[in-house]
Image (spheres, helix red, strand yellow):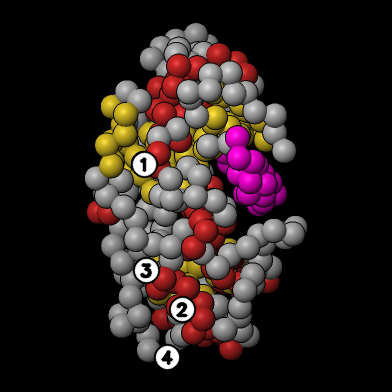
Amino acid sequence: MILINSKNSELKNIVILATGGTIAGTGIAGKTTNYKAGNLDIKSLVDSVPSLDEIANISYQQIANVDSNDITIDHWLTLANRINEISKQSDVDGFVITHGTDTLEETAYFLDLTVKTNKPVIVTGAMRPSTATSADGPLNLYQSVALAANDLSKGQGCMVVFADGIYSGRNVQKVNTFKTNAFNSIDLGCLGYMRDNIPYFLNKSIKPHTVDTEFDIFGLKELPQVSIAYFNIDADPLIIDYLAQKSEGLVIAGAGCGTFSSAWIKKVKELETKGIPVVRSSRTGSGIILKDYAIDKSTNCIPGNTLAPSKARILLSLALTKTRDYSEIKRIFEEY
Ligand code: SIN
């Protein structure tokens, strides 16, 4: 339950859940480097955005205030449960999550698969700290609130707003280390554009999300551990043994179409005989991995479809909350 500010009855009521990141970062006035992420509280952040109260009534909660490299599964479960609980309030119209950009795409996909509401959920952040010249946080936050308050956003799953673009939580990727236009969906395109506070939708994701997924995190205290093994020329196959010790599933960030060496194929087969599912994804950043293009027909690797390794890890972990059956996990990777 959250007490909602509904000052202006003509405006939508939007809840901001803050987790930190560069959008809440502070440093030397004017500079974009050497700052501390997750330093400003959500009240100060909201107060720094001109005219925000003209597009929505804002209520907020500070869930965490961390660099997004320190986001944990606990934060994910808290966020998803909080959204699921608050979204039942009839006086709440939508959500904005403020987040560090480094792992933003992972949180967005996790929420896309686990929140159970048709109300808009928008994730955003910033590449420049709040104290930089031309900080990008205020506009990203303004546009995210505007998108969350727009009727067109209902039932579109968890979306990301960044630098005037609207992206699906499933397909969005961070594609630049420092520029403000740091997010993209590469081949799969954006969902639309923001111009000031108006969204222009152009595409729709056809993948199941939010209320249409089979994943229910209610009551879960943790998620099955899934690790990612990054393949490169001559990569030590013992990495796989090491990761497998603590993992219930493994994702391989393979070369090209999710490929890896004969030494790794041997290790993967060993995992499969132990019942540890292995997903093949690609380190290339785009493209698709399909079942009819197996690297070695004798392995039973699950094709990662278009998911980046970090997102394949999320889907495998959620799949393992439901089943250990290989063909079921394959079905889940084809569907989501
Ligand atoms: C972070 O991910 O928390 C730091 C970097 C950023 O937000 O851009």
Q: Main secondary structure of the magenta part?
A: helix
Q: Residue at x 34, y 56 (%)?
A: 205
User: Compared with residue 190, is residue 26 higher up or lower down, i.e. above or below?
Assistant: above
- The residue indicated by pointer 3 is 305
Amino acid type of disc 2? Lys
Q: Secondary structure at mark 1?
A: helix
- Where residue 296 sits, quadrant-wise, is bottom left
Asked whether 310 or 111 is in front, the reply is 111
Q: Is residue 89 visible?
A: yes
Residue at screen point 30% across, 57% down: 286
Label 2 to label 3, Cα distance in Å? Answer: 10 Å
Tags 4 and 3 touching, CB below 8 Å: no
Tell me what residue is drawn at x 74 percent, y 59 percent: 219
Judge the density around disc 2: few (<14), some (14-19), many (≥20) Cα neighbours within 10 Å. many
Mark 2 / mark 3, whichever is N-terminal: 3
Instruction: Note whether residue 267 is visible.
Output: no
Name the residue tied to disc 2.
330
Question: Amino acid under label 1?
Answer: Leu
Checking the image for residue 299, the label placed there is: none
Picture layout, residue 260 above or below residue 205: below
Tell how many labels: 4
Q: Nearer the viewer, mark 1 or mark 2?
A: 1
Q: Quadrant of the C terminus?
A: bottom left
Q: Residue 162: where, in percent of width, then height?
A: 38, 34
Q: Is residue 87 magenta?
A: yes
Over which residues does the magenta segment extend?
66-91
Between the residue at mark 1 and the residue at mark 2, the CA separation in whole angstroms equals 33 Å
Q: Which mark is residue 298?
A: 4
Q: Nearer the viewer, mark 4 or mark 3?
A: 3
How many neighbours does mark 1 have within 10 angstroms: few (below 14), some (14-19), or many (20 or more)?
A: few
